[in-house]
Amino acid sequence: MNAHPQQIWTDWQAQQRAARISTADLLAEVGLSAADFPAGVLAAPDFPVSAPPHFRSLIRRGDPGDPLLRQVLARGEEALPQPGRLTDPLEEADYRAAPGLLRKYRSRALMIASGACAIHCRYCFRRHYDYGAAMLTRAGEAEALAAIAADPAIEEVILSGGDPLSLNDARLDGLVTAIAAVPHVGTLRLHSRTLMTIPDRVTPALIRLLTGTRLAVVIVAHSNHANEISADVAAALGRLRAAGVTLLNQSVLLAGVNDDAATIAAHARRIFAAGMLPYYMHLTDPVDGAAHFDVDEGRARLIEAELRGMLPGYLVPRFVREVPGRTAKTPLADLS
Ligand SMILES: *Cc1c(COP(=O)(O)O)cnc(C)c1O
Ligand code: SF4
């Protein structure tokens, strides 16, 4: 049963505001209580988590092992010290080219366009991120754009975050217009999970904004499980496809969510049916508080090999890990 009829949620910004919920209220909404979990596993009942109503409506009721629930439910162990885990695992602080601009790879620059996400994924490598210093501010924006304009090697600008689709259309339009004014930039890319969590974000105004630019537009969505691709999500993806947007999906390989070949294959087929191709499957970064999601490299290799036997090559995501200091993401096969 859907606890949140879609017709009352036409305003995407209201859905964004409605994402915050206590652990106890989230459990009650999906027909569970703390007693359904081993003692001491969960965070305190009043611990706030974030997941928009649409995403919550896709959680199976009464199933403590639900793969969507697991992505947003906070665990008590997150707060315990985890030796060897880092708050900035990718050493991104070293790649700051201008305020809000990360320049790690030669042909593309990444803008931390927003520090906000409607959903708070418990495995997120940016969960300890110091957005205060790293994020694009209105004041820093001119400097970031000047850095892009000054470097003809930059062919693609990636709006990331956080989630760039948590920005309102006016702010997004301002950024896209300014980027399109740089002649050597040909491609605009958005990294966004909002397509899955608030499909109503894909409004006619957003479509106009994306079709109105001279830039080729690529959206790399982020979903991890077939259950995230609801009919509403598929419809939103269809609107983007009809607007000529190239749609790719990245996932994170997460223990207890998608760490077996059959689950990943079902997800790949589902996103393909919705008009997207798989792009990356990221191995988790050693971020503090998320060790319970780790899948070791040996197991990841077995899963990848099994997938190659199950799917056409274009539906097998590229398994990668980010290694600080490398000039591109590193394929799993090249990791020692
Ligand atoms: C992942 C990433 C990119 C994009 O890399 P692609 O391999 O082109 O997807 C760009 N900049 C940074 C900082 C990144 O982490
Ligand atoms: S949507 Fe992406 S950036 Fe935001 S919390 Fe989830 S993984 Fe992190």
Image (cartoon, rainbow, N blue to C red):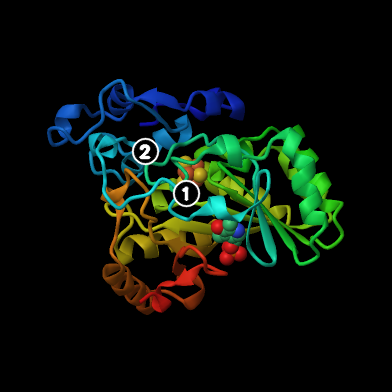
Q: Position of residue 104 (x, y in %)?
A: 61, 61
SS at mark 2 in the image: helix
**Residue occupying the point 45% across, 67% down:** 320
Q: Position of residue 11 (x, y in %)?
A: 61, 26
Which quadrant is home to the N terminus?
Answer: top left
Query: In terms of sequence position, does the residue under pointer 1 or pointer 2 come before the other?
Result: 2
Q: Position of residue 193 (x, y in %)?
A: 53, 45
- Residue at the extreme left: 39
Residue 283 vs residue 230, the one in the foreground? 283
Circle 2: residue type: Val
Q: State yes or no: Cβ of the residue under disc 1 lies below 8 Å from any atom of ligand 2.
A: no
Q: Position of residue 31 (x, y in %)?
A: 26, 28
Q: State yes or no: Cβ of the residue under disc 2 lies below 8 Å from any atom of ligand 2.
A: no
Residue assigned mark 2: 72
Residue assigned mark 1: 229
Residue 318 vs residue 236, the one in the foreground? 318
Q: Is residue 217 above or below residue 50?
A: below
Residue 18 vs residue 243, the one in the foreground? 18
**Would you identify the image quadrant in which residue 76 lies?**
top left
**Residue occupying the point 58% across, 42% down:** 163
Q: Is residue 333 left or right of residue 76?
A: right
Determine crowd level at label 2: few under 14, some 14-19, many 20+ residues with C-alpha closer than 10 A: many
**Residue occupying the point 30% across, 56% down:** 294
Circle 1: residue type: Ile
Q: Is residue 93 left or right of residue 36?
A: right
Q: Is residue 119 visible?
A: yes
Q: Is residue 190 above or below residue 46?
A: below
Which quadrant is home to the C terminus?
Answer: bottom left
What is the total number of numbered labels drawn onto the structure image? 2
Label 1 to label 2: alpha-carbon separation:
17 Å
**Residue occupying the point 33% across, 56% down:** 258
